[in-house]
Image: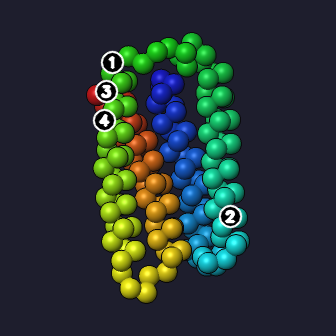
Amino acid sequence: MSFREKSAWITLISVLLTFGAFYGALGVGLVDPVSMHAFHFGLASIVILIVLQIVLHIVAAIMNPKDARTPLDEREKMIQARSHTLGYYVMMVGMLIVVVLTHVPDTNFMTTVYLGVLTMVIAALSVAIAQIIMFRRGA
C-alpha cells in the first residue's frame, strides 16, 4: 500500500472516529445541541482530529520514509484531482442545502451550523473514499 493510500485510510478512519463520536453523542442525546458542552465537544473533536492526523501521518512516514518522500506521479495526481473534484461537488450540494435551510421559517440556528459541519465531514469522507477506491482499482 502506497503512502498516499495510507494517507487516505488515515483520513477516513480519523474523521469517522472523531465526528462519528460527535454526531453520535448529539444523536443519542448525550450532549444538548444548543449548550456550550456541545460546542466544547465539537472543538475537542476538531483538535483530536488534527492530532490524530499529524501523529498517524508521522507514523506512516516513519514506517516507509522513502515512499513518503517520493513526488506524485501522473496516476496519483489524477487520483487526487478526481477525488477533490468529487469532494467539491459534494460540498456544493451540501452548502446549497444549508442555504435553503436558512430560509425555512423556525429553523434553529444550531441545526444549520451542525448541517454545515456535517457537509464538510461528508465531503472529506467522500474524498478519502474516492481516493481509496481509485488506488485499489489502479485508476
Q: Are marks 1 and 2 in contact (CB under 8 Å)?
A: no
Q: Is residue 43 visible?
A: yes
Sequence-wise, the earlier of marks 1 and 2 is 2
Identify the residue at image location x=48%, y=27%.
4
Looking at the picture, how far across and down is residue 131, in whole percent?
Answer: 39, 36
Is 13 on the left-hand or right-hand side of 98? Answer: right
Q: Tag 1, which secondary structure?
A: helix
Q: Quadrant of the C terminus?
A: top left
Q: Residues within 10 Å of mark 3 (few under 14, many from 20)?
A: some
Q: Tag 2, which secondary structure?
A: helix
| Badge 2 amino acid | Phe
* Front-most of residues 38 and 29: 38
Furthest residue to the bottom? Answer: 106
Q: Is residue 30 visible?
A: no
| Badge 1 amino acid | Glu
Q: Which residue position holds label 2? A: 41
Identify the residue at image location x=40%, y=37%.
132
Q: Which mark is residue 74?
A: 1
